[in-house]
Amino acid sequence: MLNYKKLVKFLGFKLGTLMILLMAVSVISFILIEISPTDPVRIYVGEMSISQEKLNDLNEYWGVNQSLYVKVVNWLDNLAHGNLGISLIYRIPVTEVISERFSASFMLMFLSWIFSGVLGFFLGVLAGFKRGTFIDKGVKIYSYVIYAAPVFWIAMILLMIFSVELGWFPSGLAVPIGKVSGSVTLLEWLHRLVLPVLTLSITGIAQIALFTRSKLIEVSSSDYFLFAKARGEKGWSLIKRHGIRNILLPAITLQFLSFSELFGGTVLVEQVFSYPGLGQAAVTAGTQSDIPLLLGIVLVSTIFVFCGNSIADLLYKFVDPRIRESEANDF
Amino acid sequence: MTFDKKKFQSPYSFLFGNINLRTKTLLIIALVGLILITIVINSLFINLDNITTNFAIKNSQPSFQHPFGTDWMGRDMLSRTMKGLGLSVTIGALASILSVVISIFLGLLSTLGKYFDYTVNGLTDLFLSIPHILLIMLISISLGGGITGIVVGVSLTHWTSLTRLLRAEIKQINTSTYVKISKNFGKTKWWIAKHHLLPLLLPQIVVGTIIVFPHAIMHEASVTFLGFGLSPHEPAIGVILAESMKYLSNGAWWLAFFPGLSLLIIVLLFDVIGDNVQRLLDPTQANE
């Protein structure tokens, strides 16, 4: 059974780690931006012509001339109060931009994560089961090729086939032109979600399929598998009872560990399909030097990746019976 | 027991017939290496000024004169793609060599003491916790863009896995008896590192460099595609693909298809080299 005391201790430990990690990430990303040659005040002012006096006032107001130490402490202090600043592009608080965009990105990531996981696992099992046949070779070649292909290129190919040639899907913009984002029906929204999700699923399959395949082959050479065969078990029931049971958990763990790549893929796919999610906001913030927004997105993505890694850890430590029962399991 | 010859044939047997596996591996490495070097050298001789703009043939489909078609200014896409590939491979090479240097340094550093080990471990976790693309974007902005920003950004995000590997490997070697005997003889840490560690780590380092390469190229292409680092005058593959985005809706499929496909082939070639070098240097892992 689950050891609740241990679980609470584990979660507490993870929360502490997250706090330290966030602090480190925010300080490092702040310093990285600080040494960059772009001048945030200049960007805030924009194209307006402005007198030197006024500029000095603004510099004074934003605290440009303070020492790096004071700046970092101020930044951390604001972060601790949940104040991420105001986005320079959208002119609304960064937290608002992020919360609005994150739900759009989350939907995209969640769907493709599920699809790629299920399909990849299935293909991996199939390839491992039918090892050496043309199915196996097909899955392997597919995985290698997709693994070598840039995500955004696949997105562009799909866009060309399905939007430009066939005209099934709109090319970009999650909200139809001339409509307020609030009035979009669920169906319209889903319609625009299809291609991005398809891209991320196609590319996500490769890793999990190759992993599942090699795991299944590994399991197939184990003693218990051989013994089951000797007892006369065969075919699908053999795979289900002795194969899948043993490889499902590592595969799910791997899928949780891939949050970082998933986020990276989302950034690229959102850019190609002009899907208004967090990734697109990050790219816009980066190219137009909207520093508060960019730093906010870095922090949110760090939390996101950390959650994935922690869930993987949790699964590994508390769900796997072999490790759950072992005495050596304390951290 | 009968000897099943078919089982021991390499997947490339249709190409090379029945020469032994080692020779075959060497041949494959040489061949693929030659292709890649040709691409880089070839790209050096393509002068961008010679890719003339000719509006009479703008946006023309692939043909015998222009196998990859022409773009919206009538420039030959084949030459542009080749030039871009050369640039991408060069940036990828620089970045992966740099990242391996970082890995070796941190791997050796981690063995100096408990606190060094903690620091290296913490750094690894820290760099793994931010999505690579965002971190490369941040570093590129921080260095004010340009090729330097991309190279530094990519190399600072790709050292983690090799560092972990080297760290584990070094720890293992350090527990071996011959290292202990050397220590008892009063040899310095540097002497042990040079005579015991490096020769054993060299295969890992070589394979590590080649394995990092495809990832480095891919990240370089992704980040330049998003518009960071390189200006439109430096046509890396990412920049070419970003430009072709604007012409997709006109049905100019060749602008995006061929450059992307060439990048895919380059990455696959590096995978082939990586697999084969691994097979050559580490025969125990050669058999799948």
Image (cartoon, grey):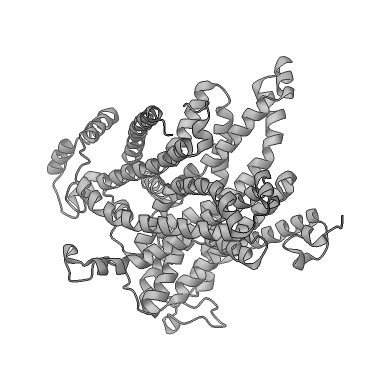
Residue A162: quadrant of the picture: bottom left
The reply to whether residue B186 is in sight is no
Give the image location of residue B157, x and y in percent: 47, 44
Give the image location of residue B18, x and y in percent: 83, 63
Q: Considering depth in this image, is A134 or B17 the residue closer to the camera?
A: A134
Q: Considering depth in this image, is B192 or A331 the residue closer to the camera?
A: A331
The reply to whether residue B263 is in sight is yes
Q: From what the image shows, is residue B107 above or below residue B215? A: above
Give the image location of residue B140, x and y in percent: 40, 48
Residue B21: quadrant of the picture: bottom right
Q: Considering depth in this image, is A315 or A295 the residue closer to the camera?
A: A315
Q: Furthest-bottom residue in view? A: B56
Instruction: Tell me the quadrant of the picture where the N terminus of chain A can be found.
Output: top left
Q: Is residue B282 left or right of residue A2?
A: right
Q: In this figure, what is the number of numbered marks?
A: 0
Give the image location of residue A94, x and y in percent: 22, 46
Q: Furthest-right residue in view? A: B1
Q: Is residue B127 left or right of residue B106?
A: left
Residue plotted at (43% across, 41% down) = A309
Residue plotted at (76% across, 59% down) = B27
Q: From what the image shows, is residue B228 above or below residue A38? A: below
Residue plotted at (47% across, 26% down) = A330
